[in-house]
Amino acid sequence: MSKSPFNTFGKSKSDHHQLVGFLMKVCYTELNAEIMNERIRHLKNIMQNCTLCPHECRVQRFKGKYGVCRISNKVYISSAGPHYGEELPLVGSYGSGTIFFSSCNLKCQFCQNYEISQLQSGRPVTIFQLAEIMLMLQQSGCHNINLVTPTHVIPYIVEAIARARELGLQIPLVYNCGGYESFSTLQLLDGIVDIYMPDIKYSDNEIARRYSGALQYWDIVRIAVKEMYRQVGNLTVNGQGIATRGLLIRHLVLPNRLAGSEKVLEFIAKELSVDSYVNIMDQYHPAYHAKNHQILNRPIKKNEYNEVIKMAESIGLHRGYAS
């Protein structure tokens, strides 16, 4: 982990309290059961002629049809278990309880988890099995349930959460996504998700279309992340430094300034908060189809990464870490 001055987690420059009580209640445990069931019905209704994500394929997934996500009416997971490679406030001492869902609503040409997101490695699980997995992760000591690429199967996930809650699930839920999210779907997750962890991949719509197959990505991700921030605010941690609620943003530095990092960071600082927790990531390497694109076919250089860190510092962002 870099020792850049940007690595100043928890040193807020405002009066916002970053430390909260260790026993802070999580969102979904407080939500009325009737409201939770109504949300599940709404989400399934949206999935009927699917507009869960901004692609708005409108395919009849309950009838076995496939949209951009290439998933119909089943949930597939690749793996589930304690994960120690996530951000420190998620990992703590016992790991983040990570569930990797197969497939994705993006088609990133450089995806480093392409076997899961694009090749759909995984096995089907029932709602009851998914709820059991969440409970097993809690029982193993994990600090949270980390839902990786949940967008395309979120109705089933919320249904599993409702079942697991009845059986004692009470650790925070992390919505770990690519940022290409529907505003209307996010509204139905208000009061359910504790921690939103979106990528902000690009600040240029055409670049996003070309390399991730996402139309109007920059316009959509800004609206989506603003809604996430409205729901949960800045990242808060308990007395042990473990995240309990809030927004945690990831931004992967790409070669040749392809991510448009300056505009991304300016958006975060000016339209969200300078107290936003931002993980500026340096682990890009050519994967999947990146070798077919000359502009992507090399690792990032140290000076490219340092340039983005300096940008963040210069506009007042100060929470997070340089990984």
Image (tube, rainbow, N blue to C red):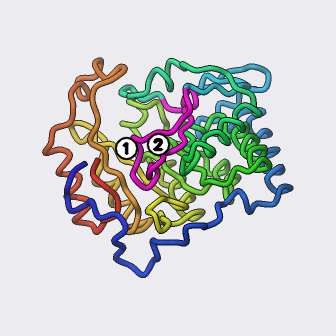
Q: Nearer the viewer, residue 100 or 265?
A: 100
Magenta-span inclusion, residue 197? no
Q: Nearer the viewer, residue 113 or 242?
A: 242
Magenta-span inclusion, residue 104? yes
Q: Which residue is mark 1?
A: 202
Q: Residue at x 74, y 51 (%)?
A: 168
Element type where label 2 sits in the image:
helix
Q: Residue at x 60, y 50 (%)?
A: 173
Give the x, y percent position of residue 17: 46, 76
Q: Is residue 288 left or right of residue 213?
A: left
Q: Residue at x 29, y 49 (%)?
A: 261
Q: Is residue 101 left or right of residue 285?
A: right
Q: CA distance from mark 1 to mark 2?
A: 8 Å
Give the x, y percent position of residue 115: 46, 20
Q: Nearer the viewer, residue 270 or 250?
A: 250
**Labels 1 & 2 near each other (Cβ < 8 A):** yes
Q: Which residue is mark 2?
A: 217
> In the current view of this chain or complex, which residue is farthest to the right?
34
Q: Residue at x 58, y 42 (%)?
A: 140
What residue span does the magenta drawing correspond to? 79-106
Q: Is residue 65 left or right of residue 3?
A: right
Q: Residues within 10 Å of mark 1 (few under 14, many from 20)?
A: many
Disc 2 marks a residue whose amino acid type is Tyr
Tell me if residue 143 comes above or below residue 257 in the rendering: below
